[in-house]
Image (tube, rainbow, N blue to C red):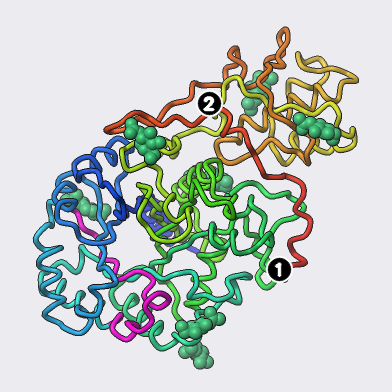
Amino acid sequence: MRTGKWEKIVLLLIFLFSSASGAFIGINIGTQMSSLPSAAEIVSILKTQQIKHVRLFDADHQMLNALSNTGIEVTVGVPNDQLLRIGESRSEAANWINKNVAAFVPATNITCIAVGNEVLTTIPNAALVLVPAMQFLQSALVAANLNFQVKVSSPQSMDMIPKHFPPSTATFNLSWNSVMYQYLQFLKNTGSSFMLNAQPYYAYAKGQGIFPLEYALFRPLDPNNQIVDPNTNFQYTNMFDAMIDAAYYSMQSLNFSNIPVTVMASGWPSLGGASEPEANIDNALAYNSNLIRHVLNGSGTPSQPTTSVSAYVHELFNEDVRPGPVSEKNWGIFASNGTAVYSLKFGHLAESSAESTGLVGVFCVANSSADSNALKKGLDWACGPGSANCTAIQQGQPCYEADNLVAIASYAYNDYYHRTQASGGSCNFGNTAMITTTDPSHGSCIFAGSSGSSTSSTEGTTPSAFGPVGALSGTSRLQFVSSEFLIAFLLTFLV
Ligand SMILES: *[C@@H]1O[C@H](CO)[C@@H](O)[C@H](O)[C@H]1NC(C)=O
Ligand SMILES: *[C@@H]1O[C@H](CO)[C@@H](O)[C@H](O)[C@H]1NC(C)=O
Ligand SMILES: *[C@@H]1O[C@H](CO)[C@@H](O)[C@H](O)[C@H]1NC(C)=O
Ligand SMILES: *[C@@H]1O[C@H](CO)[C@@H](O)[C@H](O)[C@H]1NC(C)=O
Ligand SMILES: *[C@@H]1O[C@H](CO)[C@@H](O)[C@H](O)[C@H]1NC(C)=O
Ligand SMILES: *[C@@H]1O[C@H](CO)[C@@H](O)[C@H](O)[C@H]1NC(C)=O
Ligand SMILES: *[C@@H]1O[C@H](CO)[C@@H](O)[C@H](O)[C@H]1NC(C)=O
Protein backbone atom coordinates (compact mmCIF):
# COMPACT_ATOMS: atom_id res chain seq x y z
CA MET A 1 0.00 0.00 0.00
CA ARG A 2 1.29 3.44 -0.90
CA THR A 3 1.63 6.10 1.71
CA GLY A 4 -0.39 9.18 0.85
CA LYS A 5 0.75 12.74 1.25
CA TRP A 6 -1.23 13.32 4.44
CA GLU A 7 -0.03 10.12 6.04
CA LYS A 8 3.50 11.24 5.27
CA ILE A 9 2.90 14.60 6.90
CA VAL A 10 1.38 12.95 9.96
CA LEU A 11 4.34 10.55 10.17
CA LEU A 12 6.71 13.48 9.85
CA LEU A 13 4.92 15.32 12.66
CA ILE A 14 5.05 12.24 14.86
CA PHE A 15 8.74 11.97 14.11
CA LEU A 16 9.39 15.62 14.91
CA PHE A 17 7.39 15.39 18.10
CA SER A 18 9.17 12.29 19.27
CA SER A 19 12.63 13.69 18.66
CA ALA A 20 11.63 17.00 20.28
CA SER A 21 10.62 15.10 23.41
CA GLY A 22 13.94 13.29 23.12
CA ALA A 23 16.35 11.67 25.49
CA PHE A 24 17.81 13.33 28.56
CA ILE A 25 20.85 12.78 30.74
CA GLY A 26 20.47 12.99 34.50
CA ILE A 27 22.65 12.14 37.46
CA ASN A 28 22.27 9.99 40.57
CA ILE A 29 22.86 11.55 43.97
CA GLY A 30 23.84 8.81 46.41
CA THR A 31 24.56 9.97 49.93
CA GLN A 32 26.55 7.23 51.68
CA MET A 33 29.24 9.74 52.54
CA SER A 34 31.10 10.56 55.74
CA SER A 35 30.52 14.25 55.12
CA LEU A 36 27.64 15.29 52.95
CA PRO A 37 27.55 18.74 51.32
CA SER A 38 24.47 20.76 52.21
CA ALA A 39 21.44 20.50 49.97
CA ALA A 40 22.06 24.07 48.77
CA GLU A 41 25.66 23.22 47.86
CA ILE A 42 24.51 20.16 45.93
CA VAL A 43 21.94 22.17 43.98
CA SER A 44 24.58 24.77 43.23
CA ILE A 45 26.80 22.07 41.66
CA LEU A 46 23.85 20.85 39.59
CA LYS A 47 23.24 24.36 38.31
CA THR A 48 26.90 24.98 37.47
CA GLN A 49 26.96 21.70 35.57
CA GLN A 50 23.65 22.50 33.83
CA ILE A 51 22.17 19.22 35.07
CA LYS A 52 18.40 19.17 34.59
CA HIS A 53 17.46 15.69 35.85
CA VAL A 54 18.39 14.02 39.12
CA ARG A 55 17.62 10.76 40.83
CA LEU A 56 17.53 10.65 44.63
CA PHE A 57 17.65 7.25 46.31
CA ASP A 58 15.18 8.45 48.94
CA ALA A 59 12.90 11.46 49.33
CA ASP A 60 15.08 13.65 51.54
CA HIS A 61 13.06 16.72 52.45
CA GLN A 62 16.00 19.13 52.54
CA MET A 63 16.97 18.07 49.02
CA LEU A 64 13.39 18.31 47.78
CA ASN A 65 13.14 21.84 49.21
CA ALA A 66 16.48 22.90 47.73
CA LEU A 67 15.38 21.54 44.34
CA SER A 68 12.18 23.59 44.33
CA ASN A 69 11.80 26.26 41.68
CA THR A 70 15.00 25.18 39.94
CA GLY A 71 13.39 23.60 36.87
CA ILE A 72 15.30 20.41 37.70
CA GLU A 73 13.23 17.23 37.27
CA VAL A 74 13.43 14.80 40.16
CA THR A 75 13.07 11.05 40.52
CA VAL A 76 12.54 10.14 44.17
CA GLY A 77 13.18 6.68 45.57
CA VAL A 78 11.45 4.38 48.00
CA PRO A 79 14.44 2.79 49.78
CA ASN A 80 14.41 -1.01 49.93
CA ASP A 81 13.98 -0.95 53.72
CA GLN A 82 10.65 0.92 53.39
CA LEU A 83 9.27 -1.37 50.71
CA LEU A 84 7.74 -4.01 52.96
CA ARG A 85 5.72 -1.47 54.93
CA ILE A 86 4.35 0.18 51.79
CA GLY A 87 3.64 -3.05 49.96
CA GLU A 88 1.64 -4.40 52.90
CA SER A 89 -0.47 -1.34 53.59
CA ARG A 90 -2.45 0.87 51.28
CA SER A 91 -2.59 3.61 53.93
CA GLU A 92 1.20 3.56 54.42
CA ALA A 93 1.54 4.08 50.68
CA ALA A 94 -0.91 7.00 50.72
CA ASN A 95 0.95 8.46 53.65
CA TRP A 96 4.26 8.15 51.78
CA ILE A 97 2.86 9.97 48.73
CA ASN A 98 1.35 12.76 50.83
CA LYS A 99 4.50 13.34 52.88
CA ASN A 100 7.13 12.95 50.13
CA VAL A 101 5.45 13.89 46.86
CA ALA A 102 2.19 15.81 47.22
CA ALA A 103 3.78 18.12 49.81
CA PHE A 104 6.47 19.24 47.31
CA VAL A 105 4.84 19.43 43.89
CA PRO A 106 4.52 21.55 41.84
CA ALA A 107 7.34 23.73 43.26
CA THR A 108 9.63 20.70 43.14
CA ASN A 109 9.18 18.95 39.81
CA ILE A 110 8.92 15.32 40.93
CA THR A 111 8.25 13.24 37.81
CA CYS A 112 9.06 9.67 38.87
CA ILE A 113 9.09 7.33 41.81
CA ALA A 114 11.63 4.51 41.74
CA VAL A 115 10.18 1.85 44.02
CA GLY A 116 13.05 0.00 45.67
CA ASN A 117 16.29 -0.73 43.83
CA GLU A 118 17.12 -4.11 42.28
CA VAL A 119 14.60 -5.66 44.64
CA LEU A 120 14.38 -9.11 43.02
CA THR A 121 18.13 -9.66 42.97
CA THR A 122 19.08 -8.02 46.29
CA ILE A 123 16.10 -8.66 48.62
CA PRO A 124 14.28 -11.55 46.92
CA ASN A 125 12.18 -12.17 50.03
CA ALA A 126 10.42 -8.85 49.36
CA ALA A 127 9.59 -9.86 45.79
CA LEU A 128 5.93 -10.52 46.47
CA VAL A 129 5.30 -7.02 47.81
CA LEU A 130 7.05 -5.18 44.93
CA VAL A 131 4.14 -4.90 42.52
CA PRO A 132 1.55 -4.36 45.29
CA ALA A 133 3.72 -1.48 46.58
CA MET A 134 3.79 0.03 43.09
CA GLN A 135 0.01 -0.37 42.80
CA PHE A 136 -0.68 1.20 46.21
CA LEU A 137 1.56 4.17 45.39
CA GLN A 138 -0.13 4.54 42.02
CA SER A 139 -3.60 4.54 43.66
CA ALA A 140 -2.44 7.23 46.08
CA LEU A 141 -1.18 9.32 43.15
CA VAL A 142 -4.54 8.91 41.42
CA ALA A 143 -6.30 10.03 44.60
CA ALA A 144 -4.04 13.10 44.76
CA ASN A 145 -4.61 13.72 41.05
CA LEU A 146 -0.87 13.42 40.41
CA ASN A 147 -0.84 10.26 38.30
CA PHE A 148 -0.35 12.07 34.99
CA GLN A 149 2.59 14.02 36.30
CA VAL A 150 4.34 11.36 38.40
CA LYS A 151 5.18 7.89 37.05
CA VAL A 152 5.88 4.80 39.14
CA SER A 153 8.41 2.11 38.25
CA SER A 154 11.16 0.02 39.84
CA PRO A 155 14.83 -0.26 38.76
CA GLN A 156 15.97 -3.75 37.77
CA SER A 157 19.49 -5.11 37.77
CA MET A 158 21.12 -6.56 34.64
CA ASP A 159 21.49 -9.68 36.82
CA MET A 160 17.79 -10.26 36.12
CA ILE A 161 18.93 -11.25 32.61
CA PRO A 162 21.36 -14.13 33.19
CA LYS A 163 22.72 -14.21 29.61
CA HIS A 164 22.50 -10.87 27.87
CA PHE A 165 24.53 -11.62 24.76
CA PRO A 166 23.37 -12.15 22.08
CA PRO A 167 20.55 -9.76 22.95
CA SER A 168 18.02 -11.54 20.71
CA THR A 169 18.04 -14.64 22.91
CA ALA A 170 17.95 -12.83 26.26
CA THR A 171 15.22 -13.64 28.76
CA PHE A 172 14.61 -12.69 32.36
CA ASN A 173 15.60 -15.23 34.98
CA LEU A 174 12.71 -17.68 34.66
CA SER A 175 12.35 -17.97 38.46
CA TRP A 176 10.87 -14.46 38.41
CA ASN A 177 8.49 -14.88 35.51
CA SER A 178 5.28 -14.31 37.42
CA VAL A 179 6.55 -11.19 39.25
CA MET A 180 8.02 -9.80 36.03
CA TYR A 181 4.75 -10.44 34.25
CA GLN A 182 2.85 -8.40 36.86
CA TYR A 183 5.54 -5.70 36.84
CA LEU A 184 5.39 -5.33 33.05
CA GLN A 185 1.59 -5.38 33.09
CA PHE A 186 1.71 -2.51 35.60
CA LEU A 187 4.12 -0.50 33.41
CA LYS A 188 1.95 -1.13 30.37
CA ASN A 189 -1.25 -0.06 32.18
CA THR A 190 0.27 3.11 33.61
CA GLY A 191 2.43 4.15 30.64
CA SER A 192 5.60 3.93 32.73
CA SER A 193 9.06 2.92 31.60
CA PHE A 194 11.15 -0.13 32.41
CA MET A 195 13.87 1.08 34.77
CA LEU A 196 17.21 -0.63 34.12
CA ASN A 197 20.54 -0.27 35.87
CA ALA A 198 22.91 -0.90 32.95
CA GLN A 199 26.55 -1.06 34.02
CA PRO A 200 29.00 -2.18 31.32
CA TYR A 201 31.72 -1.75 33.96
CA TYR A 202 30.55 -4.81 35.89
CA ALA A 203 30.00 -6.85 32.73
CA TYR A 204 33.45 -5.91 31.45
CA ALA A 205 35.17 -6.58 34.77
CA LYS A 206 33.38 -9.94 35.14
CA GLY A 207 33.80 -10.86 31.47
CA GLN A 208 37.54 -11.44 31.94
CA GLY A 209 38.53 -10.30 28.48
CA ILE A 210 35.73 -11.78 26.40
CA PHE A 211 34.55 -8.27 25.52
CA PRO A 212 37.16 -5.68 24.56
CA LEU A 213 37.44 -2.55 26.68
CA GLU A 214 36.66 -0.39 23.62
CA TYR A 215 33.23 -2.04 23.40
CA ALA A 216 32.47 -1.18 27.02
CA LEU A 217 33.75 2.41 26.66
CA PHE A 218 31.88 3.28 23.40
CA ARG A 219 35.20 3.49 21.57
CA PRO A 220 35.45 2.60 17.89
CA LEU A 221 35.98 -1.09 17.14
CA ASP A 222 38.09 -2.37 14.29
CA PRO A 223 35.76 -2.31 11.26
CA ASN A 224 36.81 -5.87 10.43
CA ASN A 225 35.89 -7.18 13.85
CA GLN A 226 32.49 -5.83 14.74
CA ILE A 227 30.25 -7.41 17.34
CA VAL A 228 27.16 -8.84 15.73
CA ASP A 229 24.09 -10.62 17.05
CA PRO A 230 24.13 -13.75 14.86
CA ASN A 231 20.32 -14.12 14.90
CA THR A 232 19.38 -10.60 13.87
CA ASN A 233 22.62 -9.52 12.20
CA PHE A 234 22.40 -6.32 14.22
CA GLN A 235 25.80 -4.79 14.74
CA TYR A 236 26.55 -3.61 18.29
CA THR A 237 29.07 -0.79 18.57
CA ASN A 238 28.83 -0.64 22.36
CA MET A 239 27.80 -2.80 25.29
CA PHE A 240 25.31 -0.23 26.62
CA ASP A 241 23.05 -0.65 23.57
CA ALA A 242 23.39 -4.43 23.75
CA MET A 243 22.25 -4.40 27.39
CA ILE A 244 19.21 -2.29 26.58
CA ASP A 245 18.32 -4.53 23.67
CA ALA A 246 18.65 -7.54 25.97
CA ALA A 247 15.99 -5.91 28.17
CA TYR A 248 13.69 -5.29 25.16
CA TYR A 249 14.06 -8.89 24.00
CA SER A 250 13.47 -10.20 27.53
CA MET A 251 10.23 -8.21 27.68
CA GLN A 252 9.31 -9.55 24.26
CA SER A 253 9.78 -13.10 25.48
CA LEU A 254 6.95 -12.37 27.94
CA ASN A 255 4.96 -10.86 25.05
CA PHE A 256 5.39 -7.23 26.11
CA SER A 257 6.37 -4.60 23.58
CA ASN A 258 6.41 -0.82 23.42
CA ILE A 259 7.53 -0.35 27.01
CA PRO A 260 10.43 2.14 26.84
CA VAL A 261 13.61 1.60 28.84
CA THR A 262 15.07 4.31 31.07
CA VAL A 263 18.58 3.64 32.34
CA MET A 264 18.62 4.56 36.02
CA ALA A 265 22.34 4.03 36.69
CA SER A 266 25.30 3.86 34.34
CA GLY A 267 28.83 5.01 35.01
CA TRP A 268 32.39 3.95 35.64
CA PRO A 269 34.53 4.11 38.80
CA SER A 270 37.62 6.33 38.70
CA LEU A 271 39.59 4.36 41.26
CA GLY A 272 39.80 0.72 42.27
CA GLY A 273 41.82 -1.70 44.36
CA ALA A 274 44.79 -3.70 43.10
CA SER A 275 42.49 -6.23 41.42
CA GLU A 276 40.41 -3.55 39.68
CA PRO A 277 42.80 -2.00 37.15
CA GLU A 278 40.00 -0.97 34.78
CA ALA A 279 38.62 1.39 37.45
CA ASN A 280 40.64 4.51 36.63
CA ILE A 281 40.21 8.15 35.70
CA ASP A 282 40.87 7.70 31.97
CA ASN A 283 38.22 5.03 31.64
CA ALA A 284 35.73 6.89 33.84
CA LEU A 285 36.14 10.07 31.82
CA ALA A 286 35.88 8.20 28.51
CA TYR A 287 32.84 6.18 29.59
CA ASN A 288 30.85 9.06 31.01
CA SER A 289 31.67 11.52 28.19
CA ASN A 290 30.78 8.93 25.58
CA LEU A 291 27.64 7.85 27.44
CA ILE A 292 26.38 11.44 27.61
CA ARG A 293 27.10 12.04 23.94
CA HIS A 294 25.53 8.71 22.97
CA VAL A 295 22.32 9.35 24.92
CA LEU A 296 21.94 12.97 23.81
CA ASN A 297 22.37 11.87 20.21
CA GLY A 298 18.86 10.48 20.66
CA SER A 299 19.20 7.49 18.40
CA GLY A 300 17.82 4.26 19.80
CA THR A 301 19.33 0.80 19.94
CA PRO A 302 19.77 -1.53 16.94
CA SER A 303 16.49 -3.34 17.72
CA GLN A 304 14.50 -0.17 18.57
CA PRO A 305 16.19 2.52 16.46
CA THR A 306 13.41 5.09 16.85
CA THR A 307 12.99 4.77 20.63
CA SER A 308 15.48 7.04 22.36
CA VAL A 309 16.78 6.03 25.77
CA SER A 310 17.36 8.46 28.63
CA ALA A 311 19.94 7.71 31.29
CA TYR A 312 21.15 8.80 34.72
CA VAL A 313 24.91 8.89 35.13
CA HIS A 314 26.04 7.09 38.25
CA GLU A 315 26.91 9.30 40.11
CA LEU A 316 27.47 12.84 41.40
CA PHE A 317 29.61 12.10 44.49
CA ASN A 318 32.07 9.46 45.58
CA GLU A 319 30.28 7.59 48.35
CA ASP A 320 33.17 6.94 50.70
CA VAL A 321 31.25 4.88 53.25
CA ARG A 322 29.66 2.47 50.78
CA PRO A 323 30.58 -1.13 51.62
CA GLY A 324 32.46 -3.31 49.12
CA PRO A 325 35.65 -3.00 47.09
CA VAL A 326 37.50 0.30 46.58
CA SER A 327 35.76 0.88 43.25
CA GLU A 328 32.33 0.96 44.94
CA LYS A 329 33.33 4.14 46.74
CA ASN A 330 34.63 5.87 43.62
CA TRP A 331 31.87 6.20 41.05
CA GLY A 332 31.49 9.93 41.64
CA ILE A 333 32.43 12.84 39.43
CA PHE A 334 32.97 14.95 42.57
CA ALA A 335 34.57 14.27 45.94
CA SER A 336 32.41 15.09 48.95
CA ASN A 337 34.18 18.46 49.36
CA GLY A 338 33.04 19.56 45.91
CA THR A 339 36.39 18.98 44.19
CA ALA A 340 36.01 17.50 40.72
CA VAL A 341 37.58 14.03 40.52
CA TYR A 342 37.99 14.54 36.78
CA SER A 343 36.78 17.20 34.45
CA LEU A 344 33.61 15.91 32.86
CA LYS A 345 32.11 18.79 30.93
CA PHE A 346 28.55 17.76 31.63
CA GLY A 347 26.49 20.57 30.18
CA HIS A 348 28.71 21.22 27.20
CA LEU A 349 29.08 17.76 25.74
CA ALA A 350 25.90 18.04 23.72
CA GLU A 351 27.22 20.92 21.66
CA SER A 352 30.90 20.05 21.69
CA SER A 353 32.34 19.48 18.25
CA ALA A 354 34.46 16.43 17.72
CA GLU A 355 37.13 18.54 16.10
CA SER A 356 38.01 20.73 19.03
CA THR A 357 39.23 18.28 21.60
CA GLY A 358 41.18 20.95 23.42
CA LEU A 359 44.34 18.86 23.57
CA VAL A 360 46.89 21.54 22.86
CA GLY A 361 50.54 20.54 22.78
CA VAL A 362 49.83 16.80 22.67
CA PHE A 363 50.44 14.84 19.48
CA CYS A 364 49.87 11.29 18.31
CA VAL A 365 52.66 10.28 15.92
CA ALA A 366 53.91 7.16 14.17
CA ASN A 367 56.62 5.19 15.95
CA SER A 368 59.62 5.34 13.62
CA SER A 369 60.67 1.81 14.65
CA ALA A 370 57.34 0.30 13.63
CA ASP A 371 57.11 -2.14 10.74
CA SER A 372 56.36 -0.27 7.50
CA ASN A 373 53.52 -2.59 6.47
CA ALA A 374 51.84 -1.99 9.80
CA LEU A 375 52.32 1.76 9.31
CA LYS A 376 50.75 1.59 5.85
CA LYS A 377 47.81 -0.30 7.27
CA GLY A 378 47.43 2.28 10.03
CA LEU A 379 47.66 5.14 7.53
CA ASP A 380 45.02 3.57 5.29
CA TRP A 381 42.74 3.05 8.25
CA ALA A 382 43.16 6.61 9.54
CA CYS A 383 42.48 8.22 6.14
CA GLY A 384 39.72 5.72 5.29
CA PRO A 385 37.38 4.36 7.98
CA GLY A 386 38.98 6.64 10.59
CA SER A 387 37.91 9.74 8.57
CA ALA A 388 41.07 11.72 9.29
CA ASN A 389 41.50 14.76 7.02
CA CYS A 390 44.39 13.61 4.85
CA THR A 391 44.29 16.51 2.40
CA ALA A 392 47.54 18.01 3.69
CA ILE A 393 49.53 14.83 2.95
CA GLN A 394 48.47 14.57 -0.69
CA GLN A 395 51.06 15.37 -3.35
CA GLY A 396 51.62 19.12 -3.67
CA GLN A 397 50.24 19.83 -0.16
CA PRO A 398 52.32 21.21 2.74
CA CYS A 399 52.76 17.93 4.66
CA TYR A 400 53.49 15.69 1.67
CA GLU A 401 56.85 13.94 1.92
CA ALA A 402 57.39 11.47 -0.91
CA ASP A 403 59.33 8.68 0.80
CA ASN A 404 58.69 9.46 4.43
CA LEU A 405 55.98 7.06 5.55
CA VAL A 406 56.57 7.90 9.21
CA ALA A 407 55.95 11.61 8.60
CA ILE A 408 52.82 11.04 6.50
CA ALA A 409 51.36 8.48 8.90
CA SER A 410 52.12 10.83 11.81
CA TYR A 411 50.04 13.57 10.24
CA ALA A 412 47.09 11.23 9.65
CA TYR A 413 47.30 9.58 13.09
CA ASN A 414 47.44 12.95 14.80
CA ASP A 415 44.50 14.32 12.85
CA TYR A 416 42.40 11.25 13.69
CA TYR A 417 43.43 11.46 17.34
CA HIS A 418 42.53 15.12 17.70
CA ARG A 419 39.17 14.62 16.03
CA THR A 420 38.14 11.64 18.08
CA GLN A 421 39.96 11.81 21.39
CA ALA A 422 37.06 13.59 23.14
CA SER A 423 34.71 10.86 22.02
CA GLY A 424 37.03 8.09 23.05
CA GLY A 425 39.40 7.74 20.07
CA SER A 426 42.84 6.52 20.99
CA CYS A 427 46.44 6.78 19.82
CA ASN A 428 47.24 3.20 18.97
CA PHE A 429 46.90 2.12 15.31
CA GLY A 430 47.94 -1.47 15.88
CA ASN A 431 50.69 -0.41 18.31
CA THR A 432 52.42 1.73 15.68
CA ALA A 433 51.59 5.07 17.32
CA MET A 434 52.73 6.97 20.36
CA ILE A 435 51.98 10.18 22.23
CA THR A 436 54.50 13.00 22.21
CA THR A 437 54.56 16.59 23.37
CA THR A 438 57.11 17.55 20.71
CA ASP A 439 55.25 19.51 18.03
CA PRO A 440 55.97 17.82 14.65
CA SER A 441 54.76 20.90 12.70
CA HIS A 442 57.27 22.41 10.28
CA GLY A 443 57.03 25.30 7.83
CA SER A 444 53.47 25.51 6.58
CA CYS A 445 52.73 21.94 7.66
CA ILE A 446 50.74 22.49 10.85
CA PHE A 447 49.65 19.52 12.98
CA ALA A 448 46.32 19.54 14.87
CA GLY A 449 46.97 20.50 18.48
CA SER A 450 49.86 22.79 17.57
CA SER A 451 49.50 26.19 19.23
CA GLY A 452 49.44 27.57 15.70
CA SER A 453 46.60 25.26 14.67
CA SER A 454 43.05 26.40 14.12
CA THR A 455 41.46 23.14 15.28
CA SER A 456 42.75 23.42 18.82
CA SER A 457 41.05 25.19 21.67
CA THR A 458 41.97 25.72 25.26
CA GLU A 459 40.99 23.05 27.73
CA GLY A 460 38.14 24.22 29.90
CA THR A 461 38.15 23.32 33.55
CA THR A 462 35.14 22.20 35.48
CA PRO A 463 34.18 24.88 37.92
CA SER A 464 33.66 23.65 41.42
CA ALA A 465 30.84 25.05 43.46
CA PHE A 466 32.50 25.21 46.81
CA GLY A 467 36.09 24.12 46.54
CA PRO A 468 39.10 24.24 44.29
CA VAL A 469 38.94 22.41 41.02
CA GLY A 470 40.69 19.06 41.04
CA ALA A 471 42.56 19.29 37.80
CA LEU A 472 43.18 16.15 35.90
CA SER A 473 46.90 15.72 35.79
CA GLY A 474 48.46 16.13 32.39
CA THR A 475 49.94 12.67 32.28
CA SER A 476 46.94 10.67 33.44
CA ARG A 477 45.03 11.68 30.31
CA LEU A 478 47.63 10.16 28.11
CA GLN A 479 47.53 6.53 29.10
CA PHE A 480 45.43 4.79 26.52
CA VAL A 481 44.95 1.11 26.80
CA SER A 482 42.80 0.51 23.79
CA SER A 483 43.68 -0.94 20.46
CA GLU A 484 42.08 -0.15 17.16
CA PHE A 485 43.26 -3.31 15.52
CA LEU A 486 43.64 -6.24 17.82
CA ILE A 487 40.11 -7.45 18.28
CA ALA A 488 40.30 -10.51 16.15
CA PHE A 489 38.78 -13.00 18.51
CA LEU A 490 35.32 -11.87 19.34
CA LEU A 491 32.77 -13.61 17.23
CA THR A 492 34.25 -17.01 17.86
CA PHE A 493 33.64 -16.48 21.57
CA LEU A 494 30.24 -14.94 21.35
CA VAL A 495 28.29 -17.17 19.03
C1 LIG B 1 8.16 19.40 35.11
O1 LIG B 1 8.68 18.50 34.15
C2 LIG B 1 7.77 18.18 33.14
C3 LIG B 1 8.38 17.10 32.29
O2 LIG B 1 9.47 17.57 31.57
C4 LIG B 1 7.45 19.44 32.36
O3 LIG B 1 6.53 19.13 31.34
C5 LIG B 1 6.85 20.48 33.30
O4 LIG B 1 6.67 21.69 32.63
C6 LIG B 1 7.76 20.71 34.48
N1 LIG B 1 7.05 21.50 35.47
C7 LIG B 1 7.59 22.56 36.04
C8 LIG B 1 6.74 23.25 37.07
O5 LIG B 1 8.71 22.96 35.79
C1 LIG C 1 17.55 -16.99 39.05
O1 LIG C 1 17.00 -16.53 40.27
C2 LIG C 1 17.03 -17.53 41.29
C3 LIG C 1 16.25 -16.98 42.46
O2 LIG C 1 16.79 -15.76 42.92
C4 LIG C 1 18.47 -17.81 41.63
O3 LIG C 1 18.55 -18.77 42.64
C5 LIG C 1 19.18 -18.32 40.37
O4 LIG C 1 20.55 -18.48 40.63
C6 LIG C 1 19.00 -17.34 39.22
N1 LIG C 1 19.50 -17.97 38.02
C7 LIG C 1 20.45 -17.42 37.27
C8 LIG C 1 20.85 -18.19 36.05
O5 LIG C 1 20.97 -16.34 37.54
C1 LIG D 1 3.25 -15.18 23.88
O1 LIG D 1 2.34 -15.21 22.81
C2 LIG D 1 2.44 -16.39 22.03
C3 LIG D 1 1.53 -16.24 20.82
O2 LIG D 1 0.30 -15.69 21.17
C4 LIG D 1 2.05 -17.58 22.91
O3 LIG D 1 2.18 -18.77 22.16
C5 LIG D 1 3.01 -17.63 24.10
O4 LIG D 1 2.60 -18.67 24.98
C6 LIG D 1 3.00 -16.32 24.85
N1 LIG D 1 4.05 -16.37 25.85
C7 LIG D 1 3.86 -15.97 27.10
C8 LIG D 1 5.05 -16.08 28.00
O5 LIG D 1 2.81 -15.51 27.49
C1 LIG E 1 23.94 10.59 16.05
O1 LIG E 1 24.98 9.72 15.68
C2 LIG E 1 24.92 9.30 14.33
C3 LIG E 1 25.97 8.24 14.12
O2 LIG E 1 27.20 8.61 14.66
C4 LIG E 1 25.13 10.52 13.45
O3 LIG E 1 25.07 10.14 12.10
C5 LIG E 1 24.03 11.52 13.75
O4 LIG E 1 24.24 12.70 13.01
C6 LIG E 1 23.99 11.86 15.23
N1 LIG E 1 22.82 12.67 15.48
C7 LIG E 1 22.85 13.72 16.29
C8 LIG E 1 21.54 14.43 16.47
O5 LIG E 1 23.86 14.10 16.86
C1 LIG F 1 38.85 17.20 48.59
O1 LIG F 1 38.80 15.79 48.65
C2 LIG F 1 39.75 15.15 47.80
C3 LIG F 1 39.49 13.65 47.82
O2 LIG F 1 39.19 13.20 49.11
C4 LIG F 1 41.15 15.52 48.27
O3 LIG F 1 42.11 14.89 47.41
C5 LIG F 1 41.31 17.02 48.19
O4 LIG F 1 42.57 17.39 48.68
C6 LIG F 1 40.22 17.72 49.01
N1 LIG F 1 40.32 19.15 48.78
C7 LIG F 1 40.14 20.02 49.75
C8 LIG F 1 40.31 21.46 49.41
O5 LIG F 1 39.88 19.68 50.90
C1 LIG G 1 58.27 1.81 19.09
O1 LIG G 1 58.31 0.53 18.47
C2 LIG G 1 59.33 -0.32 18.97
C3 LIG G 1 59.37 -1.56 18.09
O2 LIG G 1 58.07 -2.12 17.96
C4 LIG G 1 59.07 -0.62 20.43
O3 LIG G 1 60.07 -1.43 20.97
C5 LIG G 1 59.00 0.69 21.21
O4 LIG G 1 58.63 0.43 22.55
C6 LIG G 1 57.99 1.63 20.59
N1 LIG G 1 58.08 2.92 21.25
C7 LIG G 1 57.03 3.50 21.84
C8 LIG G 1 57.29 4.81 22.51
O5 LIG G 1 55.92 3.00 21.85
C1 LIG H 1 41.08 19.39 5.45
O1 LIG H 1 42.30 20.04 5.61
C2 LIG H 1 42.50 21.10 4.66
C3 LIG H 1 43.88 21.69 4.91
O2 LIG H 1 44.82 20.70 4.95
C4 LIG H 1 41.45 22.17 4.82
O3 LIG H 1 41.62 23.17 3.84
C5 LIG H 1 40.08 21.54 4.68
O4 LIG H 1 39.09 22.51 4.95
C6 LIG H 1 39.93 20.37 5.63
N1 LIG H 1 38.68 19.70 5.37
C7 LIG H 1 37.82 19.40 6.35
C8 LIG H 1 36.58 18.72 5.91
O5 LIG H 1 38.03 19.66 7.53
Vertical relation: 211 (above or below) 220: below
Vertical relation: 338 (above or below) 250: above
234 drawn magenta: no
| Residue 250 drawn at (x, y percent) | 51, 77
Which of the labelled discs sits on residue 99, or is there none?
Answer: none
> Which residue is more in the foreground, 299 or 323?
323
Residue 315 shown left or right of residue 410 in the figure: left
123 drawn magenta: yes
Three-letter code, disc 1: Leu
Mark 1: which secondary structure?
Answer: helix
Mark 2: which secondary structure?
Answer: loop
Instruction: Identify the residue under disc 1.
Output: 494
Q: Tell me the residue at 54%/57% (across/down).
A: 201
Q: Quadrant of residue 369?
A: top right
Q: Tell me the residue at 11%/80% (across/down).
A: 91
Region rendered in magenta: 108-131
Q: Tell me the residue at 52%/50% (across/down).
A: 272
Residue 143 shown left or right of residue 305 in the figure: left
Three-letter code, disc 2: Gly
Which of the labelled discs sits on residue 358, or is there none?
Answer: 2
Circle 2 packing at 10 Å, graded few (<14), some (14-19), many (20+), is: some
Q: Tell me the residue at 10%/70% (across/down).
A: 144
Mark 1 touching mark 2, by CB under 8 A? no
> Which residue is more in the foreground, 383 or 200?
200
